[in-house]
């Protein structure tokens, strides 16, 4: 079995370990999430969820911090890097420390540069991954951050979402699609960004992500019968109308929502880690259908190290 598939299928087991970790956000502090690639997307989703729940948070790419040496005003910087070694994130951590801001590193590597540099670290080494592409570790880190606001045991729910994801996606004839669009609002826009990245990284597909109602304002011009549109919906009427319009134009939709083809529970946005499961599996399946090895995608390395 490919590592990527193993790392997706072990998500419920990973989530069970979360009860051993204690991490809480405070409304008295302002947080800054920093990361690259999927780790940036994690920060984007966490920031959105925190803001929606009355917390102060912002997000920035590590590359921006490294290049421009400036950051938004904040009390605590949370540096996310699965491998703990990405050059931009390591350099950003040093810059942020020089500004006198507290740094917390979140990583899945046991001994890494980020945990050496950061003031505090959360090391989730049981979730270390062999694959280049981040899957289960993404869900786990997001669940940890969500639990910093509100406590949820995602393990049981993740089994159900995993089952329905494999059931629904295994029935799709993925050879029909060569263009993948991901739609969603707020935290679901972050999931859509990550979904697009998964299909791009693992399966080398043409991808897009937008807010749902923005899709009619231009991007829809590229829609064909070879397009699969994944709607990360909050079950509102306008999103349902959009789904119908997209289908009328000949494309296929896959709705991830409380009543969609793939169901997630409604935890007022806090269900977000579960929404990653179907899109990660979709990326894996499309890679296999294309004849690619999802464990070692083209031109990518596990962490980017700059000279
Ligand atoms: C960040 C990252 C990955 C991406 C790629 C290159 O890694 O951008 O998200 O899939 O393999 O590196 P990290 O800082 O989280 O280790």
Image (spheres, helix red, strand yellow):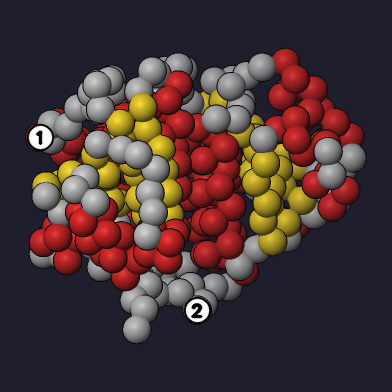
- Packing grade of label 1 (10 A; few <14, some 14-19, many >=20) is few
| Earlier-in-chain disc, 1 versus 2 | 1
Find out if the beta carbon at label 2 lies less than 8 Å from the nearest ligand 1 atom. Answer: no
Tell how many labels: 2
In this rendering, would 265 be left or right of 143? right
Residue 78 higher or lower than 6, as above or below: above
Using the rendered image of the protein, determine whether residue 83 is visible from the camera's viewpoint. Answer: no
Which of 63/231 is in front? 63
The residue that mark 1 highlights is 20
Circle 1/circle 2 CB separation < 8 Å: no
Which of 6/128 is in front? 128
Residue 73 higher or lower than 85, as above or below: above
Image quarter of residue 61: bottom left
Secondary structure category for the residue under label 1: helix
Secondary structure category for the residue under label 2: loop
Which residue lies at the image location 51% right of the left edge and 41% below the top edge? 191
- Packing grade of label 2 (10 A; few <14, some 14-19, many >=20) is few
The residue that mark 2 highlights is 299
Tell me the quadrant of the picture where the N terminus can be found.
bottom left
Image quarter of residue 26: top left
Which residue lies at the image location 51% right of the left edge and 77% below the top edge? 298
Tell me the quadrant of the picture where the C terminus can be found.
bottom left
Which of 115/175 is in front? 115
Image quarter of residue 31: top left
Distance between the alpha carbons at the discs numbered 1 and 2 = 37 Å
Residue 108 higher or lower than 277, as above or below: below
Residue 229 location (% of width, % of height): 71, 43
Which of 78/38 is in front? 78
Using the rendered image of the protein, determine whether residue 149 is visible from the camera's viewpoint. Answer: yes
């Amino acid at each position: 079995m490919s590592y990527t598939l193993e790392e997706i299928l072990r998500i419920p087991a990973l989530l069970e370990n979360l009860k051993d970790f204690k991490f809480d956000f405070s409304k008295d502090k302002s947080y800054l999430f920093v990361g690259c690639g999927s780790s940036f997307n994690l920060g984007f989703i966490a920031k959105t969820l925190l803001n929606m729940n009355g917390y102060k948070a912002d997000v920035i790419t590590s590359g921006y911090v490294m290049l421009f040496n400036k950051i938004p005003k904040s009390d605590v910087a949370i540096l996310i890097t699965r491998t703990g070694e990405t050059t931009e994130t390591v350099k950003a951590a040093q810059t942020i420390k020089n500004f006198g801001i507290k740094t917390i590193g979140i990583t899945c590597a046991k001994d890494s540069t980020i945990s050496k540099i950061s003031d505090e670290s959360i090391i989730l080494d049981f979730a270390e991954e062999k694959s280049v592409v981040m899957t289960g570790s993404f869900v786990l880190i997001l669940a940890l951050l969500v639990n910093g606001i509100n406590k949820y045991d995602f393990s049981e729910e993740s089994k159900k979402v995993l089952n329905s994801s494999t059931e629904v996606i295994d029935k799709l004839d993925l050879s029909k699609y060569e263009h993948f669009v991901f739609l969603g609002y707020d935290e679901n826009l972050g999931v859509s960004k990550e979904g697009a990245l998964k299909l791009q990284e693992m399966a080398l597909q043409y991808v897009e992500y937008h807010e749902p109602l923005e899709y009619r304002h231009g991007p829809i011009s590229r829609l064909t019968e070879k397009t699969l549109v994944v709607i990360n919906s909050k079950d509102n009427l306008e999103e349902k109308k959009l789904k119908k319009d997209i289908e009328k134009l000949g494309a296929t939709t896959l709705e991830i929502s409380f009543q969609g083809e793939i169901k997630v529970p409604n935890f007022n946005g806090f269900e977000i880690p579960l929404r990653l499961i179907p899109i990660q599996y979709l990326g894996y399946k499309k890679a296999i259908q294309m004849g690619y090895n999802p464990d070692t995608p083209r031109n990518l390395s596990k962490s980017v190290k700059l000279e």
